[in-house]
Image (cartoon, coloured by chain):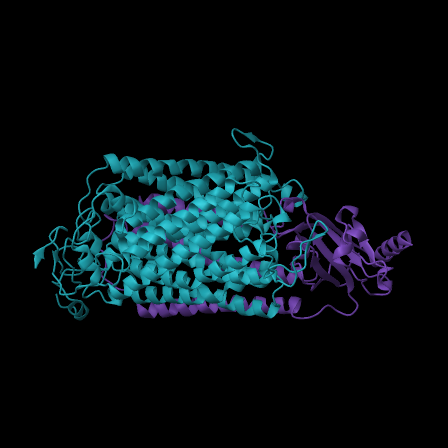
Chain colours: A purple, B cyan
Amino acid sequence: MGLVLLIVIWLITLVSTYFFVAKTWWLPVGASAAAAAIDHHFTVSFILMGVVFVAAQLALGYLAWKYREGGSSKAEYSHGNTTLELVWTVLTAVLFVGMNLMSSSIWASERFRQAEAEAVHVEVTGMQFAWYFRYPGPDGKFGVTKPELEDASAGGEAALGLDTKDPASKDDVVSGVMVVPVNREVEVILRAHDVIHSFFVPQMRFKQDAVPGLAIHMHFTPIQTGEYEIACAELCGLGHYKMHGILKVVSQEEFDKWLAAREAEKQ
Amino acid sequence: MVGGSGGGETITMSTHESAVQAAHAHGAPQGFIRKWVFSLDHKVIGLQYYFLALAAVFVGMFLSLLMRIHLIWPTAVLPFFGEIKPETYLSLLTMHGTIMVFFVLTTAPQGGFGNYFLPIQIGAPDMAFPVLNMLSFWTTFLGFIVLLAAFFVTGGAPLHGWTGYAPLSALQSAGPGEGLGADLWITSIAIFCIGALMGALNFITTTLDMRAKGMTMMRMPLTVWAWFITAILGLLAFGVLLSAGILLLMDRNLGTSFFVPLVTVNGQLTGHKGGSPLLWQHLFWFFGHPEVYIAILPAMGLCSQLLSVFSRKPIFGYKAMVYAMLSIGFLGFMVWGHHMFMSGMSPYTAFAFSIMTMGIGVPSAIKTFNWLGTIWRGRIRFHSPMLFAIGFVSLFVTGGISGPFLAQPVLDIYLHETYFVIAHFHLIMGVASIFGIFAATYYWFPKMFGKMMNETLAKLHFWLTFVGAYAIFMPMHYYGMSAGLRRYSQSTEVAYILKLLPLQRFISIAAFITIGSQFIFLFNLFWSMAKGKKASDNPWEATTLEWITATPPPHDNFGGQTPVVHNGPYEYSVPGAPRDFLMQTDPSVEDEDKKKGKH
């Protein structure tokens, strides 16, 4: 029985580890400025925790086999070993706290500072079950929105409840697709109308909940052009699985052209 | 000195008398209702809790079966159920989570085995408050009935997940199931909390007040320590959830706005304003994180016990184990924010919650190290309880190792709400705890029913479940690493998630096999009750007090006597002793002598 345990535990461990090492299923290639540091810390964590995982499982399988009844001698009468206990405690404390300190500087650089002054501003609004993206237009100011003006079935500006009497709203652009320029920081202002949603773009290594009653300011910098899928990552109701959007990262020229065209459409 | 029934051990009469003992003096109650339904006997109440959890676990498992079918055959039309719609899928996952967390993982280890064995293991005739004990079971039972009722009302069961995040859980208009179904769901949880609070009070008082002579705190079996610490966690956590549930009911039905700001659903104003959705999350997780330890601590205590019994060796580092459990319990109350890194909470608090959470890894690692140390240089007997205990250690390591990923906010940005999280908490809180329940069942069944379970079936059950659990939950890590999101009823809408469908197929097939093999356990349980081989009083040659008394134990546990304790709970292979185990009541070798090496 000890031998079977050893074989099964070792096999499970090695097969599980293989797929992590081979990266058969893995993070998609990163496309934001923060991705490199985050991915590096993923790798570091996988190596450290992987060593602990493999060592503990192999030891468990080995000890179960080695000290099976009928194998070696009599059981040892021992209540433990305080020195070993202390060494082990200190080692794990150093490992866990060290890992934490390594990652907290990345977290700080992502989330402790505000977006740069020249960042592109996009207001992202989640509602059951769609994303809307609003750009402030040339005046750089978002117009006022009012809940009582909302008309979800009409889509676009009406869905957001944009108050057209507010001068700042005249040049606001509302889009069903999120278009941003490459290599420039994007400041998203996350809002939600009804329940909590969560804005997630795996390639940007970016996720943030959109909470009713809050306007959450966050930022990321795309460094690779292309089309990326936005998925809702917080359970928001029966259509959660299809609350889906597109993030298009384009060159600055294309972005300017696109925004100008949308402005022109509006007039 | 009078002769005990446990294979020649002696039970000494004690002068220690308590009110409860006096209450028990008049003997066992007669009549079916007083004996088996509204019983005051902690052993009967323990069995009631156990069978409630057994019914609940098969309901919960059946719901997961439906989910696994739906995930790989979304358009399948099932007999009696018809097609599973997206909202049905969400109801299934909500009810699966709620039933498993409350009515299985909290109910079986603590309410079931804790009730049955805590008083016996400390040498008490019953719990401190037998009436409260009965009330706590029947309250829990009522909670379960109310929860199941949610399936049968208009709109069906709620779809807001077991975490019930507001405003989704607070607005009737937010989706089907958010009407009466959601009210029943919250009511059920509130009722459960009341039952759990009564139970917790009873466990704490019993442990502190009812120990037999010589049963010092540091001679308590680790199972007792685990139940005791779990009860303290329950006392502090369930009160908070109860209050939060009442506030949520008020938001839903009385027009208050604790958790709901000004929101519109489908463009319509709801009349709420000024509430905070994050407040619900704080209150919920202030309960929810300690709840993880409420589920796992009894399994930790039990598996420590079993590794020692079946390795025929004292537990490695008894004191370290006690301190580790205490610090896990203590730190468990300071880490709830790690569920909320992406919630919009201040990023500075994330830093604090992260470091506390990493800190909780230290006592967890100490326990793992001591478990390995216990079997090291032992003489392992591979009976089925031991196999499940070893399986528990393996699953605890695997489930634990993904914790530090999720505990670091910078990695949680990516992993939050993916299947990586499902893999993590199912392995450590779900499967590992359930392995504890299985181990406990195989270990204590002889004492509870006087029969042995069939060992061949038990081993078959172990191998299928152990390999099956890994086959289900290991691929979920890969699914999550590829950004596969949880709580998605279909994978068709997002291209990168659709590509992961082969993994889902593999997981579903593994789940079908593993679920099927649980019927081996069910069969073995009931078959052995009727036809099992007769059990002796101490079939595992273990040292704790439940093994000195008759099988099954008499109404007052020790037949009118109170044991006197002379030894710690893990005296195996003591040099010079006649056998390789020394009962806790055996006065022949005192602790002091053993320390000095005199035998």
Percent x, y for residue B280? Answer: 56, 60
Image coordinates of residue B62 in percent, x first then y, are 46, 38
> Can you tell which quarter of the image residue B199 is in?
bottom left
Q: Is residue A61 visible?
A: no
Q: Residue at x 72, y 56 (%)?
A: A125
When the figure is inspected, residue B367 is found, relative to residue A82, above or below; the finding is above
The C terminus of chain B - image quarter: bottom left
Image spot of residue B380 (x, y percent): 27, 50
Q: Position of residue B245 (x, y in %)?
A: 51, 57
Displayed quadrant of residue A82: bottom left
Position of B95 with respect to B460 (left or right) is right
Which residue is rendered at x = 32% and y = 48% of the image?
A: B439
Horizontal side of residue B472 vs B500, given as left or right: left
Q: How many marks?
A: 0
In this picture, residue B77 sits left or right of residue B493? left
Foreground of the two, B305 or B46: B46
Image quadrant for the N terminus of chain B?
bottom left
Image check: B589 left or right of A87? left
Quick one: which residue is furthest to the front in this view?
B254
Which of B484/A52 is in front?
B484
Residue A141 at least partly seen? yes
